[in-house]
């Protein structure tokens, strides 16, 4: 078992500047991917004050290394290609690179966000970690943060194939935004990073707005693995149904707060309509993970 590592957050005012007009995400912090597990706070797409993003991203790294959820790259097959949609401050991309690169797994990671400010922060986080020696200088040629809209039809990055697609999209519904977020979050974090404000409809429809698009992108880029963060078990089950209807992947799991509890693993098999899902860990649902493309999916043209 490799040494679990995570992201520590420090005051980034001296790094990204404090001008809220130039850099509205200046409250988000510079990332240090080399300290003790569980010190991670939130990235710009996470719900406030919870380490769910770090938990499932770390667990994904363990599954990549030990469970063959995706074929390990070789010197002749090219790098493991990861697409991080709604990357925000780049936390997921940098954490996955930190965890996987030390295992000598060749990587190419692309983190995409519609916000120019978020992309600038992700890029500065990358440079900062390299300057502090937390990441090797070679990370510059293996991690990229282009600006892009996941809902736009013209996506140059979409034309590439990816092994893994991950996303921590805006998933908080309007009702939950007012009910569950703290005042500091509402005052200082852009609402568009948390709530799909462009979508109208019922509360659940608005909160789930990004998931069908992300599933579509993972399908078109022929991703073998797809992992999406969710807010709770109710939303996780809705996302499982969306994935099931696509008929792209054979295996579906829900990862919870306790997914990293190796001393007392908790695994439950459940049925959701016609779909069989595995729930890993105890606690609230934090991510939906799917893999194992069907033969029908592999025969489709992207």
Image: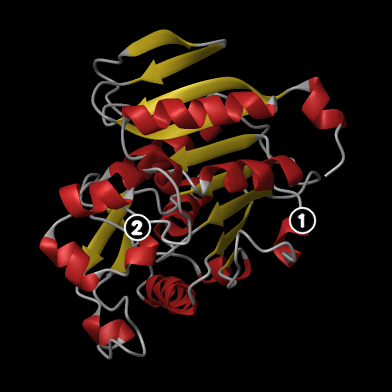
Q: Position of residue 175 (x, y in %)?
A: 26, 48
Circle 2 packing at 10 Å, graded few (<14), some (14-19), many (20+), is many
Using the rendered image of the protein, determine whether residue 272 is visible from the camera's viewpoint: yes
Instruction: Quadrant for the C terminus, please.
Output: top right
The residue where tag 1 is placed is: 160
- Relative height, residue 285 to residue 24 (above, below): above
The residue where tag 2 is placed is: 194
Whether pointer 2 and pointer 1 mark residues with C-beta atoms closer than 8 Å, the reply is no
Residue drawn at x 53%, y 25% as measured from the top left: 241
Residue drawn at x 37%, y 20% as measured from the top left: 280
Q: Nearer the viewer, residue 138 or 298?
A: 298
Q: Position of residue 206 (x, y in %)?
A: 43, 48
Q: Position of residue 123 (x, y in %)?
A: 48, 75
Instruction: Point out the frontmost of discs 2 and 1.
Output: 2
- Relative height, residue 164 to residue 12 (above, below): above
Please state if 122 lies on the left or on the right of 67 as rendered. left
Q: Nearer the viewer, residue 224 or 77?
A: 224
């Amino acid at each position: 078992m490799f040494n679990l590592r995570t992201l520590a957050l420090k005051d980034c005012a001296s790094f990204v500047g404090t001008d809220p007009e130039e850099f509205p995400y200046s409250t988000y912090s510079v990332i240090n991917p080399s300290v003790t597990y569980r010190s991670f706070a939130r990235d710009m797409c996470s719900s406030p004050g919870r380490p769910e993003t770090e938990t499932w991203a770390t667990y994904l790294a363990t599954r990549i290394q030990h469970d063959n959820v995706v074929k390990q790259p070789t010197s002749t097959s090219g790098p493991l290609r990861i697409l991080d949609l709604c990357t925000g401050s780049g936390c997921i991309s940098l954490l996955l690179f930190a965890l996987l690169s030390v295992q000598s797994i060749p990587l190419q990671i692309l983190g995409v966000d519609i916000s120019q400010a978020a992309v600038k922060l992700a890029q500065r986080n990358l440079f900062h970690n390299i300057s502090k020696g937390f990441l090797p200088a070679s990370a510059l040629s293996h991690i990229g943060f282009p600006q892009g809209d996941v809902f736009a039809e013209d996506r140059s990055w979409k034309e590439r194939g990816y092994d893994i697609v991950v996303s921590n999209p805006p998933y908080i519904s309007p009702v939950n935004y007012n009910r569950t977020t703290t005042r500091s979050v509402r005052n200082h974090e852009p609402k568009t990073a948390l709530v799909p404000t462009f979508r109208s409809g019922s509360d659940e429809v608005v909160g789930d707005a990004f998931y069908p698009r992300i599933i579509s992108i993972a399908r078109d880029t022929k991703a073998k693995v797809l992992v999406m963060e969710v807010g709770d078990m109710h939303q996780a089950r809705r996302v499982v149904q969306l994935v099931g209807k696509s008929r792209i992947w054979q295996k579906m799991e829900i990862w919870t707060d306790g997914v990293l509890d190796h001393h007392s693993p908790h695994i439950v098999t459940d049925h959701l309509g016609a779909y069989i899902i595995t729930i890993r860990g105890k606690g609230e649902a934090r991510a939906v993970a799917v893999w194992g493309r069907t033969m029908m999916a592999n025969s489709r043209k992207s």
